[in-house]
């Protein structure tokens, strides 16, 4: 992946993360099942960590 592609993917994941957090808050309010959304958020967090690491590696070359 190029630096631009990684940056774009990071921004896309951040938008997804914010949307999912909002959905999670709604589910908490109505006492819904939070587990699936929590798992998705954890997956996005891991992917963001990986992409940020890759971006740092590219910038340090």
Image (cartoon, rainbow, N blue to C red):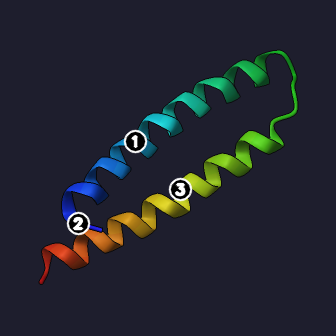
In the image, what residue occupies the spot 77% across and 24% down? 28
User: Pointer 1: residues within 10 angstroms few (<14), some, or many (20+)?
Assistant: few
Q: Is residue 41 left or right of residue 56?
A: right
Q: With respect to residue 52, does 21 lie above or below?
A: above
Q: Which residue is mark 1?
A: 12
- For label 3, the SS is helix
Q: CA distance from mark 1 to mark 3?
A: 12 Å
Query: Which mark sits nearer the N-terminus, 1 or 3?
Result: 1
Q: Going by the image, does 51 lie left or right of 55?
A: right
Q: Is label 1 in a helix, a strand or a loop? A: helix
Relative to 38, residue 24 above or below: above
Out of 38 and 59, give the one closest to the viewer: 59
Q: Residue 25: where, in percent of width, then height? A: 67, 24
In the image, which is nearer the foreground, mark 1 or mark 3? 1
Image coordinates of residue 27 in percent, x first then y, are 77, 23
User: Of helix, strand and loop, which one carries label 2?
Assistant: loop
Q: Quadrant of the N terminus?
A: bottom left
For disc 3, the neighbor class at 10 Å (few under 14, some 14 to 19, many from 20) is: some
Residue located beneath label 2 in the image: 2
**26 vs 58, nearest the viewer:** 58
Measured in 3D between alpha carbons, the distance from the residue under mark 2 to the one under mark 3, in whole angstroms, is 20 Å
The residue positioned 79% from the left and 43% from the top of the image is: 36
- Image spot of residue 10 (x, y percent): 36, 51
Question: Mark 3 sits on what residue?
Answer: 45
Q: Quadrant of residue 15?
A: top left
For discs 2 and 3, the disc positioned in front in the rendered view: 2
Choose top left, top right, bottom left or bottom right for residue 30. Answer: top right
| Distance between the alpha carbons at the discs numbered 1 and 2 | 15 Å
- Residue 47: percent from the left, percent from the top? 50, 61
- Label located before the other in sequence (2 or 3): 2
| Residue lying at 32% horizontally and 73% vertically, measured from the top left | 54
Residue 42 relative to residue 59: left or right: right
């Amino acid at each position: 992946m190029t630096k631009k592609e990684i940056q774009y993917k990071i921004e896309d994941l951040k938008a997804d993360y914010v949307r999912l957090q909002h959905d999670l808050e709604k589910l908490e309010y109505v006492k819904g099942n939070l587990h699936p959304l929590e798992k998705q958020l954890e997956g996005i967090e891991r992917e963001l960590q990986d992409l940020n690491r890759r971006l740092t590696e590219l910038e340090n070359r």
